[in-house]
Image (cartoon, rainbow, N blue to C red):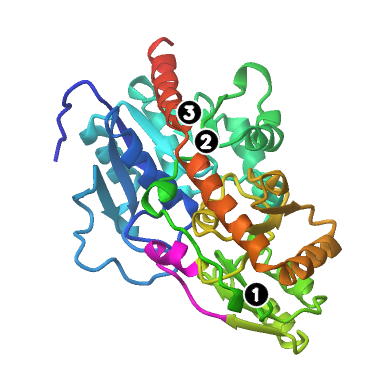
Amino acid sequence: MCIKKTGTKLKIITFVHYYIPGYKGGGSIRTIEAMVECLSDKFEFYIITKDRDSGDRTAYKKIPVNSWNKVGRAKVFYASKDYLTLCNIAKIIKNTSCDLIYLNSFFDFSFTVKPLILSKIFSAQSKPVVLAPRGEFSEGALRIKKAKKWLYIKTVSLFKLYGGCVFQASTFIEAEEIKAGFFKHMPGKDAPDLLIATDLNIVAKNNPLDRKISESEVGTRLKVCFLSRISPKKNLDFALKVLSKINSQIRFSIYGPIDSKTYWNECEKLMQVLPGNILVEYKGTVEHSNVVSTISDYDLFFLPTLGENFGHVFLESFVAGVPVLTSDRTPWRDLGEYQVGWDVSLDRPDEFVKIIEKYAFMGQGERQKISRNCIKYATKTGNDRAVVESNIALFLKAFEGKKNT
């Protein structure tokens, strides 16, 4: 099926490993969903994704596979594993008559490497490529399978596979991580371009809350939650070690898909030796539509991640009126200054302990003030027009740059 060019909008074909209705595949789902909603007046989006959610063995029900589907303001192609051959990907790119290719991982073989190989093979007809690593160059992320990733980076640098791409960083912090993790291997004229455009998010627009904290909630067991993928990068084991040093009464609820069973087994061992004042429970996965309401049932959101390029779940916690306790390895910095939470170095585990102990004894008035600060902070941050404009500029600059070469 050949899709004809319409109007004056640029056509962007987006490769992303998971997309809606999936919800277990990480923040890139939320980013692309928000991008479609916020930027469809300027661009047409054609999305290529897997036919199932992260960890699922079966495809989505009632969704036609290996064909185009109208999903919101985008057209989505849910591809089966066997369909994603070089030949079929080439056909998809050709038939969409796209103006630009948007990739959402550096290491993903089917959804990044294959489109890049095709771009090199058909260099005369190649389209501009924007690539968002989505935090894959953070120190914590690169530490996982370090030797394998280092070898891959050295190999693709040698063959200049990513040459000509425009890299997207969500923050200045991620920009420096990309430079240190990849660009240093392609110095001078071989280095790709790098632009900063913060991840879009519509949660603050669609989920306004006004959380009321009653006196009865204060002085009882502090309710703390962790909501993310269960993987080494999210650092659940660190959270459990911190809680093992807490003297206050804590109920710790863990939500999220188990990405690594080996890592989960290690965490379970830590749970088994927690003191009696810490009650811990694993409560499974949460559909994205229920994330804000789920977090709103808690007093504190605790996610000491090893690194995030954005961290949509932090904004969702602020929308829920719940303060965040996290590491200093995310874009959500100086939270104490805004009185919406705390960002602490992972080298200071005792500081995490002190914060939780202090919050456990905080009065109703102080907690209510912090909760309202969180909601105001989410509204201001989530509805920043400059973020939308930076994403528009990202695609226009990549397209104009390719056109003028």
Is residue 281 shown above or below 180?
below
Is residue 163 shown above or below 237?
above
Where is residue 139 shown, x and y percent of the image? 72, 47
Task: Point out which mark residue 386 bears.
Answer: 3
The amino acid marked with disc number 1 is Val
Is 336 covered by the magenta stretch?
no
Helix, strand or loop at label 3? It is helix
Residue at 42% in and 17% down:
402
Choose mark 1 or mark 2, whichever is in front. 1
The amino acid marked with disc number 2 is Thr
Helix, strand or loop at label 1? It is loop
**Inter-mark Cα distance, 1 to 2:** 37 Å
Q: How many marks?
A: 3
Q: Give whichever of 295, 53 is nearer the camera.
A: 295
Choose mark 1 or mark 3, whichever is in front. 1
- Looking at the image, do the residues carrying marks 2 and 3 touch, with CB atoms under 8 Å apart? no
Q: Is residue 224 left or right of residue 276?
A: left
Helix, strand or loop at label 2? It is loop
Where is residue 174 shown, x and y percent of the image? 63, 37
Label 1, residues with CA under 10 Å away: few <14, some 14-19, many ≥20: some
Is residue 223 shown above or below 93?
below
Residue at 70% in and 52% down:
140
Label 3, residues with CA under 10 Å away: few <14, some 14-19, many ≥20: few
Is 293 covered by the magenta stretch?
yes
The amino acid marked with disc number 3 is Ala
Residue linked to disc 1: 218
For the magenta stretch, what is the residue range? Answer: 282-294
**Mark 1 or mark 2, earlier in chain:** 2
Residue linked to disc 2: 198
Q: Is residue 86 left or right of residue 136?
A: left
Q: In the rendered view of the protein, which quadrant contains the C terminus?
A: top left
Where is residue 100 shown, x and y percent of the image? 35, 28
